[in-house]
C-alpha cells in the first residue's frame, strides 16, 4: 500500500476547513493527535505514564497482596546467606532454586531492604518503582521506533501485568527491565551496553534465551562480525563471573538447575496448552514437535526477514562465518549497519520473542511480563486497522486473566500468538528491507 504525501495547506484549503462543521473539525483534530500529526501528540506518552503511576499507587493501596513465590525467594536467599552454595540443596516452600545467579543477588538486596522479606508493603513499593522504570524504558523504545500515540494507552491497560509486578513481585519483572534496557541501548547503537544489559537479564531468568537469535543478528549486522564475536564472549563471560560462587562448589548442579532445558512442567499450571489435554501435553512427541516448529519458524524469520539488510543470500553469510571471517567488506558493513534502525531492532527482537512464546513448552502467568508490552507494537507494525489492534489485544488480555486457564482461554492465548507472528511476518516486511538499496534502484529507474 502506497502512502499518500500530504501537501501544504493553501489559504483556500484552510478556509474550507474552518467552514466545515465543528464536529468534523473536532474529529479530525483527535485523529491528528492520536496519529502523531499534531503538536499535542507529544503529550500523550507523559500523560499515559502519569496515569499509570497513579494506578499503581491505587493498586498497592487498595488491592490485597497475593503470595506465590516471594516467600520461597526469601527462604532460598536465607540459605545462601547462611553459607550454602550448592544449587541442588537450595530450596524454598515452592521447590528448588531454578534461576541463575543474578536472581540471587537481586533478591538478596530485596531481602535486606524488606526486613528479610517480612515487609511486603516495602517490597510492593519497590516493585511499583520497578514497573514505572520499565514502562519509561518501553515508551522510550516505542518513541525511537516512531510509534504513533494511539498505541501508547495499550501499555498501561493490562490488569495481569500490574498484578505480576506489584501484587506478585516475580523475578520476571527484573528480566523484563533488562531486556528493554538492552533493546533501548541497541537502538542507540550502544552495542556493548546492549549486550551487557541482555546478559544481566539472562542471569535473572533463562527465558531471555528466546530472543538470543535476534540479538545475535542485530549485533552481527549492526556492530560487525568482529565486534559481535567479542560481545558474544562478553555475554558468556558475565554468566560465568556472576556464577563463580556456585560454579566453584557444584558446577553441574548450578548449570542443571539455573539453565535446565529439560524441565518437566505441570499441566495444572499451563496457560497456553490446556486445550490439547494432559496426555498430549506431557508426551515427549509433543515437546519435540514444539521444538521442531520453533526452529522452523525462527529459520523462516531469519532467512526471509531479519537478514534482509545483509543484501546477500544466507549461504554467502554462513560460509565465511564458519571460517571465522566477516561476510562483509568494510564498505558493505557500513551500508548494512545503517539499515539496522531502531525500528528494525525492535521489530526483530520482539518478533523473536513472540515466536518463542508461541512454541514454548508451557507458559505460566508471570510470562505475560515479556509479552504485554510487546504485542501493541507488533500489532501496529503488522499494519492491521487500529480497531483490530485493540480487539486482538483485548482478546489476549482476557485469555491471560482467566484463572485457572481453560481449553478456550488457552486456545485464545496460542491463537493470538500465532496470529501476531503471522501478521508481523506479512505486514512488517518493510522494517527489514534494505531501504538504501531500494532508493538507489528507484533512482536508476527514474
Image: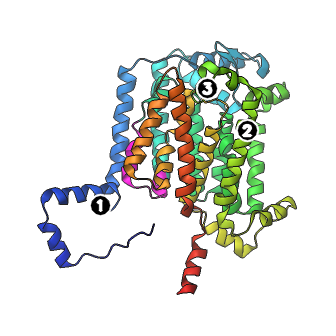
Q: How is the image coloured?
A: rainbow
- SS for dot 1: helix
Residue highlighted by disc 1: 39
Q: Indicate the position of residue 394 as horizontal and vertical percent values.
A: 41, 37
Residue highlighted by disc 3: 107
| Residue occupying the far top of the picture | 93
Tell me, yes or no, if residue 21 can be seen here: yes
217 lies left or right of 340: right
Q: Indicate the position of residue 210 as horizontal and vertical percent values.
A: 67, 42
Q: Determine the CA span between mark 2 and mark 3.
A: 32 Å
Question: What is the magenta segment's predominant secondary structure?
Answer: helix
Residue highlighted by disc 2: 291
Quadrant for the N terminus in the image:
bottom left
Q: Determine the CA span between mark 2 and mark 1.
A: 48 Å
In the image, 273 versus 24, the foreground residue is 273
Query: What residue range appears in magenta?
Result: 142-157
The answer to whether residue 278 is above or below residue 315 is above
Amino acid at each position: 500500500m502506497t502512502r499518500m504525501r500530504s501537501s501544504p495547506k493553501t489559504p483556500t484549503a484552510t478556509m474550507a476547513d474552518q467552514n466545515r462543521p465543528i464536529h468534523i473539525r473536532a474529529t479530525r483534530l483527535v485523529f491528528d493527535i492520536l496519529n502523531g500529526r499534531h503538536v499535542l501528540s507529544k503529550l500523550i506518552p507523559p500523560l499515559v505514564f502519569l496515569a499509570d503511576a497513579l494506578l499503581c499507587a491505587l493498586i498497592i493501596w487498595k488491592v490485597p497482596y497475593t503470595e506465590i513465590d516471594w516467600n520461597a525467594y526469601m527462604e532460598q536467599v536465607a540459605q545462601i546467606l547462611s553459607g550454602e552454595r550448592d544449587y541442588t540443596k537450595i530450596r524454598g516452600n515452592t521447590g528448588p532454586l531454578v534461576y541463575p545467579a543474578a536472581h540471587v543477588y537481586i533478591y538478596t538486596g530485596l531481602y535486606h531492604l524488606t526486613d528479610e522479606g517480612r515487609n511486603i508493603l516495602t517490597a510492593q513499593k519497590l516493585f511499583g518503582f520497578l514497573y514505572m522504570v520499565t514502562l519509561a524504558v518501553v515508551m522510550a523504545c516505542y518513541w525511537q521506533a516512531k510509534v504513533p500515540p494511539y498505541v501508547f494507552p495499550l501499555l498501561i491497560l493490562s490488569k495481569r501485568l500490574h498484578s505480576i509486578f506489584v501484587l506478585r513481585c516475580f523475578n520476571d519483572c527484573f528480566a523484563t527491565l533488562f531486556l528493554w534496557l538492552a533493546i533501548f541501548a541497541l537502538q542507540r547503537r550502544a552495542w556493548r551496553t546492549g549486550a551487557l544489559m541482555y546478559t544481566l537479564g539472562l542471569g535473572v531468568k533463562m527465558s531471555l534465551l528466546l530472543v538470543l537469535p535476534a540479538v545475535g543478528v542485530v549485533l552481527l549486522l549492526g556492530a560487525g562480525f568482529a565486534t559481535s564475536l567479542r560481545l558474544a564472549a562478553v555475554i558468556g563471560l558475565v554468566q560465568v563471573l556472576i556464577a563463580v560462587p556456585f560454579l566453584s562448589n557444584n558446577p553441574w548442579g548450578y548449570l542443571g538447575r539455573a539453565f535446565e532445558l529439560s524441565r518437566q512442567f505441570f499441566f495444572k499450571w499451563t496457560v497456553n496448552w490446556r486445550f490439547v489435554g494432559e496426555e498430549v501435553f506431557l508426551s515427549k512427541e509433543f515437546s519435540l514437535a514444539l521444538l521442531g516448529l520453533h526452529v522452523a519458524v525462527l529459520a523462516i524469520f531469519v532467512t526471509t526477514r531479519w537478514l534482509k539488510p545483509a543484501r546477500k543470500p544466507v549461504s554467502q553469510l554462513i560460509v565465511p562465518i564458519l571460517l571465522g571471517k566477516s561476510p562483509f567488506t568494510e564498505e558493505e558493513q557500513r551500508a548494512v549497519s545503517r539499515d539496522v534502525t531502531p525500528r528494525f531492532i525492535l521489530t526483530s527482537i520482539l518478533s523473536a520473542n513472540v515466536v518463542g512464546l508461541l512454541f514454548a513448552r508451557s507458559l505460566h502467568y508471570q510470562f505475560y511480563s515479556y509479552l504485554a508490552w510487546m504485542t501493541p507494537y507488533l500489532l501496529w507494525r503488522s499494519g492491521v486497522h487500529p480497531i483490530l489492534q485493540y480487539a486482538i489485544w483485548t482478546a489476549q488480555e482476557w485469555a491471560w486473566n482467566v484463572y485457572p486457564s481453560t481449553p478456550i482461554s488457552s486456545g485464545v492465548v496460542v491463537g493470538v500468538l500465532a496470529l501476531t507472528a503471522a501478521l508481523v511476518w506479512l505486514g512488517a516486511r518493510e522494517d527489514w528491507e534494505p531501504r538504501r538499496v531500494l532508493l538507489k534502484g528507484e533512482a536508476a529507474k527514474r
